[in-house]
Amino acid sequence: MLFYYLQHVQVLIYSKILKIEEINLNQKLENYKLNLTNYIKGDKSIWGIVLLLSIFSFLPVYSTASNLVYVIGSGSVLGYLFKHVAIVTVGFTIMYFTHLVPYRYFSAIAKIFYPVVTLLLIYTALQGSTVDGANSNRWITIPILGFSFQTSTVATVILLVYVSSFFSKNKNKKIELFDSILKLWFPVFLFVGLILPANLSTSLMLMIVIILLSFFAGYPFKYLISIILISIFSLALFIVIVKSNSDSISNRIDTWFSRVETFYGDGDKNTNYQSERAKSAIAMGGIFGIGAGKSMMKNVLPQSSSDFIYAIIAEEYGIFGSMTILFLFIILMLRVLINVQRTQSFFGKLLIFSMGLSLILQAFVNMGVATGVLPVTGQPLPLISAGGTSIWMTFLSVGIILSVTANNQLDLIDKKMNQ
């Protein structure tokens, strides 16, 4: 009898121990999830899409690096791949630390950097240099470090934060046209005007994003129409002035018109070389592509590692691969719209809208150029094309979006705790 009693006690003790161990294991899992959430905040879907696109970018960049070696005349394929991996790693670091910063601080940061970026844009317009075979004054080089960066990409992020901050602070105020011209449109036209001579597509896209952002923020429509008309008149006046006074900028304008004429079939067919090669690359890819690294057009298609990388993706991975990339950007766009709707703060809404719209618009323009839907613009494919500053500023933009979505998660937790 005593034996059975002791055996029963032993079973009870073992069951208690197992239950305690199960509770401890569940607690450890919950703590792990909590710690992971503390380290990685914000919309996990956006994290996942950015990670997928960035890792995938190693394949087409490695494949097209041979073109860079040929154009620049130095370096190696592996060297350019390692450079791209290093740049993406730095980009992730920028995104990670940016998403930890409370988004309300970005307004003050933009105001501090606004005059600095203005001076950089002026310096770039006067002293810009050629980088990786790109023949425009879009970059400046730091003498001691020998590092080049594209100031227009930095200016885009700073200006979008500045405009978002302006509308946030004037949400409940009646906006007058004259007052908004001084505080809003003068800084906008200054940045866009400094970017315009060397990079028409970037300046136009930036202006489109700001106009749509203004409409979304509730800027009076009658004033917005006036701003659009002023913008068109200013662009026309700029073209007339530089055509008669500046040979270098005049050549850039001739290039703009030539691209548009070629796109509509009225220009010189020889200037349509890039578009025709891009279409050939897409046609050769078929449904599933000719295989990773086997592109034949990468060595004859200029800027195949940046502006036309989507065509190389279509050639090597086919319609399936190119549509997968398009699908990921569409999901990213939907996540941006969902987070805009979920965000309570007006400033947060504007930040997500502006950063997301700028990124998605650039992606669609790049894919449109590669497929022949749009004229050649020189815009890289975000998160995939080779680059430097453009990659980092893309990660910075995503970091700002994640910062806002992280705050949304904290608001949701507080709401549940107070119920």
Image (cartoon, rainbow, N blue to C red):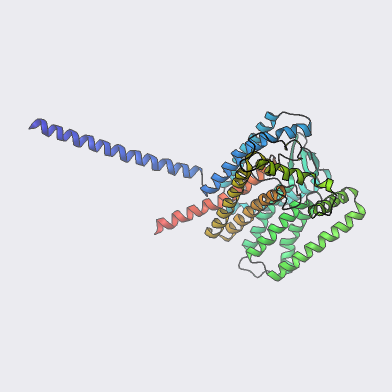
Q: Is residue 145 visible?
A: no
Which residue shows up at 47% across the image and 42% down it?
A: 36
x and y, in percent, of residue 357 in the image = 64, 55
Number of marks in picture: 0
x and y, in percent, of residue 108 in the image = 64, 53
User: Residue 349 falls in which quadrant of the image?
Assistant: bottom right
Q: Nearer the viewer, residue 164 or 244?
A: 244
Relative to 340, 283 lies left or right: right
x and y, in percent, of residue 137 in the image = 81, 44
Quadrant for the N terminus in the image: top left
Q: Nearer the viewer, residue 309 or 84?
A: 309
Quadrant for the C terminus in the image: bottom left
Which residue shows up at 61% across the image and 65% down it?
A: 171
Relative to 155, 19 lies left or right: left
Which residue shows up at 85% across the image and 60% down it?
A: 237
Q: Is residue 357 above or below residue 228?
A: above
Furthest toward the left, the residue is: 1
Which residue shows up at 59% across the image and 53% down it?
A: 333
Q: Nearer the viewer, residue 48 or 323?
A: 323
Q: Is residue 16 visible?
A: yes
x and y, in percent, of residue 142 in the image = 76, 37
